[in-house]
Image (spheres, rainbow, N blue to C red):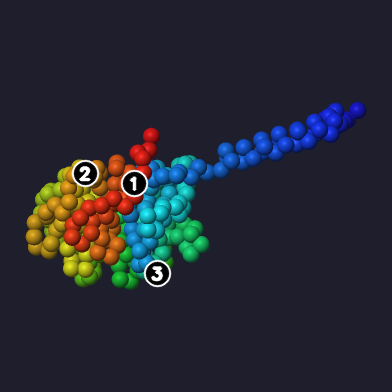
Amino acid sequence: MAFSFSLLLGEPQRLTAFRLFALLAVVISLDAAPTVAADMQYPLAVVAGADGTVFVADRKLPGIWKVTGETAEVYFQGSKKFRTPLNAVRCVAIDKDGLLLAGDSATREVYRFDKAGKPQPLTKGGIGIPMAIAVDGDGDLFVGDLETQRIWKVPAAGGEPKEFAVVPAPRGLAFDKQGRLWVVSHGKNQLIRLGTDGKSEIVAKGRPFRFPHQVVLDDDGTAYVSDGYAKAVWKIADGKAPEKLVEGKPLDNPVGIALRGKDILIADPRANALFAIDAEGKLSTLLQSKPAK
C-alpha cells in the first residue's frame, strides 16, 4: 500500500524536516552559483572610458572589473569552464561609441559589451590569441593575434577579420593622431608603426626593452611602453631613444597600460594592483589586492 513519509511524522517533526530540506536547498543553490572573487586575481589589461570609468581585465577571476574612484566591482564574471566567454580574457578597449571591447583566447573571440552589459561576439571565433585591440577613426577594430603572428582588421559592426599586417608576436597596439598604428612586438624591432597601407616604419630600432607588453600615446604623440621584465614604463618621444619614466617598486610586472586624462594607468598581475603615473611622473597605487593563492 502506498503511503507518505510525512504521515509517519507528527506535526513538529514535519516542520523540522521541512526546515532541514529548505536549508539544504539553499546550500545546494549557493554551491552551484558562480564564484565571485572579492579581490582582483590577475589584472592583465586596463582601459578608461571618456567619463573616467576604468575597466580591468582579470585573467584569473576570470572576467572584468569596473573601477569607479577607489571602488571596484565585478562588471562581468566569466565561468571557470574553458571555451566559455571571457574565460581567458587578455585585453580590453573602448569602441567609437564608448562601449567596452574585450579579447578572449578561450573562445578565440573579440566581444563588444552591449548597453545591458552582455558580451556579444564579433568575429565568429576568427581570432586566435587576441593580445591587444585598437580602434581607428572609422570605428574599425585592429586586433593583435599572438597565435597567427598577425594584426587583423575587424569591421566596426563585426564580421570576418581581414589580414592587415604580419608582425612577429604583436602584444600592444595604439593609434596616433595621424592614423598610424603603433605596434609593440617581439620582433627584431620591438616598436614600429604601420601606415594605413600596412607598411611599417621603425620607431625604436632593435630591442631596447626587456619584455614589452603594451603601448599608449598621449596628445603630444609621446609613446609609453610597459615592460614586465624591466619593471618599468618607458617614454618614447618621437625621434628620440626610449628612456625609463618609472622603474622598480611598487611595480613588479607592469603589463596593461592605458590613459585616463593625463594619468597613465598600469595593470600589474604580479603585484595584483592597479597603479597610476600622474603628469609629473609620480607613481601611486590606486588599488591593490592580496596575491591570489
Is label 2 in a helix, a strand or a loop? loop
Q: Nearest the camera: 186 or 196?
A: 186
Rendered location of residue 182, percent (x, y): 21, 60
Q: Residue at the far left: name it.
A: 240
Q: Quadrant of residue 124?
A: bottom left
Q: Which of marks 1 and 3 is nearer the N terminus?
A: 3
Q: Name the residue under label 2.
A: 249
**Left or right relative to 261: residue 72:** right
The residue where tag 1 is placed is 288
Amino acid carrying mark 1 in the image: Gln
Q: Residues within 10 Å of mark 2 (few under 14, many from 20)?
A: few
On screen, residue 217 above or below 292: below
Q: How many labels does the image show?
A: 3
Q: Residue at x 29, y 41 (%)?
A: 270
Residue 240: where, in percent of width, then height? 8, 60
Q: Is residue 101 visible?
A: no
CB within 8 Å, label 1 to label 3: no
Return the disc, 3 or 2, that comes first in the chain's sequence.
3
Q: Tell me the distance, in whole angstroms, between the alpha carbons under discs 1 and 3.
A: 30 Å
Q: Position of residue 282 (x, y in %)?
A: 20, 55
Q: Name the residue under label 3.
A: 97
Mark found first going from the N terminus, 2 or 1? 2
Task: Please state the horizontal and vertical placement of residue 236, each as a whole percent of the image.
Answer: 14, 58
Quadrant of the drawing holding the N terminus: top right
Q: Is residue 285 above or below residue 28?
A: below
Q: What distance separates the C-alpha of mark 3 from that of mark 2?
A: 37 Å
- The amino acid pointed to by label 3 is Asp
Amino acid bearing label 2 = Lys
